Image (cartoon, rainbow, N blue to C red):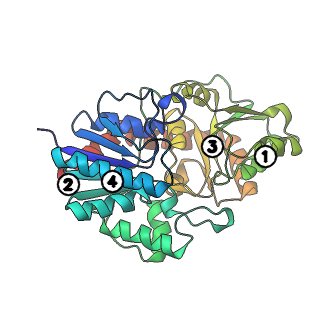
Amino acid sequence: MRKRVAIFTHGGIGTGNQSQGFPLITQIVNRLAQDFEITVFSLAPLNPDFNPQTFQAFSPPAALRPSMLRWLWLIGKFIRHNSGYKQEVLYSFWGYPTGFVMVVVGILFRKKTIVNLLGSESANLPEINYGFLRKTHLRKLVLWTCHQATELVVVSHYQIRMLKPYGFNREVRFIPWGSDREMFYPQPKTSNAPLNILHVANLNEVKDQETLLRAFQLIRSRVPAKLRMVGPDFMNGKIQQRAKELNLGDDVEFKGLVSHNQIAEHYHWAHLFMLTSLSEGQNNSIGEAMMCGLVPASTSVGIMDELQDAGVVVKPGDFKSLADGVVDLYLNPVEWEKRRQRALQWSTQYDLNWTVTALKDLLNES
């Protein structure tokens, strides 16, 4: 009989456009379901047309509010489900609040628990009101969750570095989330002029697209360049207006939300991927870009904090150094190719198959 695993998440499965949710989470769960009996408990409501073929999924009614009632519904559903279908391991995507709730449930029912840190649990950005480390009581809950989980998984060593100043000290599993080689692969570029720069992310304050646009303005003043931005807008046109104020004209295009199964064509258009986030757990888009043979240029957050020699890496907000680094590298084709190859090698080593194998090993050990 296959081991039974309950996955807790606050969203990312069966939600959003075409029910793709957080596409990589869905890919991972589908692959884990080949070896394990998976039941998903999602705080976010599942789309009515979402019909998973490889696992069970439950979520509270969409009209149920506030979130406390939704958590109580979800816990009650787990209790009822577990009474006749004993779960052996509890696994959480995100450390807070999902991981906290799941660890409490695990303690009450004496279950082994795995918490996978992904993002805001290791962030402290009070200037934009982001990150669970910014407030004392939330920070204590995050750290308690991290220390009480049977196993703790991180997707980058950057997350550990962000937690350590607050007394974090325990063994972790480093399992970065890799991309699917069948979806993302290099294509030969016939020319690198103009320099095609791609940015794939939600338009929001954490991604700091102000720094992106200011860096691009400097790059464009020195070499021919185009910038393409892919992702939904959560800032009500502020970034588009800023591009106009910087007189970037037709050299910047906004593509909006693009289906995950169509995103590779944008990677194949580009030469360089630029990320200017103030904080990241890992950032999966930059991994997809590297697998497609792009050179990464990024702030020192997430996985790029430890891949300094695979692209251009600068401190958050430093648009001038970012622009200088990109132009210098662009004008040095030998070094450009060296860094492109390093990025490609890392992304193919830690691909989706590697990730799923590592997670399956962890679940089998638990």
- The residue that disc 3 covers is 202
> Whole-Å distance between the Cαs marked 4 and 1?
40 Å
**The residue tagged with tag 2: helix, strand or loop?**
loop
Question: Can residue 257 be seen here?
Answer: yes
Residue with the most extreme left position: 1
Q: Nearer the viewer, residue 338 or 2?
A: 2
Q: Nearer the viewer, mark 4 or mark 1?
A: 4
Between 240 and 284, the one lying in front of the other is 240
User: Mark 1: few, some, or many residues within 10 Å (few <14, many ≥20)?
Assistant: some
Q: Position of residue 230 (x, y in %)?
A: 65, 35
Instruction: Report the amino acid beneath label 4.
Output: Ile
Mark 3 surroundings: few (<14), some (14-19) or many (≥20) residues within 10 A: some
Q: Amino acid at mark 2?
A: Ser
Lower sequence index among marks 4 and 2: 4
Disc 2 vs disc 1: Cβ atoms closer than 8 Å?
A: no
Tag 4 residue: 75
In the rendered image, residue 106, in percent from the top left (x then y), is placed at 26, 60
Tell me whether circle 4 and circle 3 mark residues in contact (CB < 8 Å).
Answer: no
N-terminal label among 2 and 1: 1
Q: Which residue is mark 2?
A: 366
SS assignment at label 1: helix
Give the Cα distance between marks 2 and 1: 47 Å
The structure residue drawn at horizontal position 56% and vertical position 63%, both measured from the top left corner, is 131
Report the residue marked by disc 1.
238
Q: Amino acid at mark 3?
A: Asn
